[in-house]
């Protein structure tokens, strides 16, 4: 079975002396639970593994019982250390307070129980971490699968990756495209929205959130002002509501909204978002076109290639902690702007015959970025770009 590169990092941290709670975050269906099962099979330390998915939601007492079970098992076996793994932790009400209380109790009493928490909603987990567990944890973010991973694990071609995205669970279904699309829509999109957002966060207009997601996927890789969005939605909320819903969708690894790059932070915040899916499967599963039609249509294919470069940059921006923007002024635009540690990189994606771009020249004049890169026609081939870590560009 394929092992994601993150496995080695988590294993090293677990094998260290007990210091921090290890928190593994990431969207649904990217292999968090599979990776932890692989990890447990490789460790010599005894463990208790529990999933909050299996319990009637929101019971903090359950969490205390699980912890007490680990303590009793550790005592009975005479082990010097024990590992407690809790999956879908965000389902438990007030989980961070309980974790803080039990972790601190073990620290005081010198009980060496190491802790791994897994969760699929970045927003809810990070809220709990910053409110209650400051200084007690480290996070590892598992993003969507990259082209290099899908190629190694499933032998996928670049065309398959650009169209079918990077969900490992759906890889065996691509021979029957209709079945694949239904799986993505029902098992991934619907479950993520209903379980990770609607069940756990107050959303006054669920239909609006779902419509925003559908519209955002349809326009992935394109700028759309909130005014235009409200014009396309029957049950329109105000722009603040839409911005908040987009943030929720982004925190679940579904749909992000890139802000416009500008010298001033104020202008950046007030810009129209450029929609960007976190995984191309979210875009193609909702479209009417088929794989065979898409790969021979320059327009459709160009859009998917640009979106796949965007998914690569967006996923890595979370784990590698760089800022990702777009830039546009009048008719001039640059697809992606990467920003980290005072360095700025302009990146344009071209899949057509011409590599000419006025936007890059204009950006260079205004902001003098450290690097200007072209991906696709006349630049780095996109199949190569999708295999590199974007931080290597800085």
Image: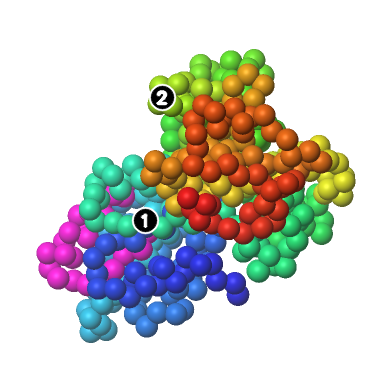
Which of the pair 154/108 is nearer the observer? 154
Return the residue nearer the eye: 32 or 87. Answer: 32
Residue 276 versus residue 167 in the image, above or below = above
- The residue lying at 39 percent from left, 41 percent from top is 342
Q: Secondary structure at mark 1?
A: strand
Q: Label 1 to label 2, Cα distance in Å?
A: 30 Å
Kindly give the residue lying farthest to the left in the view shown.
108
Q: Residue 87's spot in the image, x, y percent? A: 43, 59
355 left or right, relative to 150: right
Which residue is depicted at the point 78% across and 38% down?
A: 354
Query: What residue would you read off at disc 1?
Result: 139
Label of residue 264 in the image: 2
Q: Residue at x 63, y 19 (%)?
A: 330
Residue 129 lies in magenta, yes or no?
no
Q: Residues within 10 Å of mark 1 (few under 14, many from 20)?
A: some
The image quadrant of residue 365 is top right
Question: Can residue 193 be seen at all in this image of the molecule?
Answer: no
Is residue 10 visible in the rendered image? The answer is: yes
Residue 270: image x %, image y %? 47, 21
From the top left corner, tell me how far across and down residue 392 is, in percent.
50, 56
Left or right, 71 with respect to 218, comes to left
The answer to which of marks 1 and 2 sits earlier in the sequence is 1
Left or right side of 64 for 376: right
Q: Which residues are magenta?
A: 93-117
Secondary structure, mark 2, is loop
Q: Nearer the viewer, residue 158 or 137?
A: 158
Q: Nearer the viewer, mark 1 or mark 2?
A: 2
């Amino acid at each position: 079975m394929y092992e994601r590169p993150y496995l080695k990092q988590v294993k090293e941290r677990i094998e260290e002396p007990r210091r921090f709670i290890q928190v593994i975050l990431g969207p649904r269906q990217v292999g968090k639970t599979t990776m932890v099962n692989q990890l447990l099979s490789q460790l010599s330390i005894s463990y208790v593994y529990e999933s909050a998915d299996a319990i009637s939601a929101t019971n903090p007492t359950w969490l205390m019982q699980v912890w007490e079970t680990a303590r009793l098992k550790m005592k009975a076996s005479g082990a010097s250390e024990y590992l407690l793994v809790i999956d879908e932790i965000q389902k438990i009400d007030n989980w961070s307070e309980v974790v803080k209380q039990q972790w601190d109790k073990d620290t005081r009493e010198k009980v060496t129980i190491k802790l791994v928490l897994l969760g699929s909603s970045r927003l809810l987990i990070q809220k709990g971490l910053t409110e209650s567990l400051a200084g007690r944890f480290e996070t590892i973010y598992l993003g969507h699968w990259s082209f290099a991973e899908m190629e190694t694990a499933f032998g996928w071609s670049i065309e398959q990756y650009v169209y079918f995205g990077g969900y490992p669970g759906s890889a065996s279904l691509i021979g029957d495209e209709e079945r694949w699309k239904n799986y993505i829509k029902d098992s991934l999109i619907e479950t993520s929205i209903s379980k990770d957002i609607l069940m756990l966060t107050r959303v006054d207009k669920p239909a609006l959130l779902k419509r925003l997601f559908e519209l955002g996927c349809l326009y992935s890789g394109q700028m759309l002002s909130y005014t235009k969005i409200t014009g396309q939605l029957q049950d329109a909320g105000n722009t603040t509501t839409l911005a908040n819903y987009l943030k929720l969708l982004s925190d679940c690894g579904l749909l992000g909204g890139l802000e416009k790059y500008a010298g001033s932070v104020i202008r950046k915040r007030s810009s129209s978002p450029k929609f960007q899916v976190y995984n191309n499967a979210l875009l193609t599963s909702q479209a009417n076109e088929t794989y065979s039609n898409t790969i021979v249509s320059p327009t459709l294919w160009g859009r998917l290639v640009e979106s796949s470069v965007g998914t690569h940059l967006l996923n890595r921006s979370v784990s590698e902690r760089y800022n990702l923007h777009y830039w546009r002024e009048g008719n001039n635009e640059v697809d992606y702007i990467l920003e980290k540690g005072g360095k700025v990189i302009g990146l344009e994606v071209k899949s057509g015959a011409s590599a000419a771009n006025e936007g890059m020249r204009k950006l260079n004049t205004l902001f003098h970025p450290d690097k200007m890169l072209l991906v696709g026609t006349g630049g780095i081939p996109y199949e190569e770009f999708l295999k590199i870590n974007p931080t290597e560009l800085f």
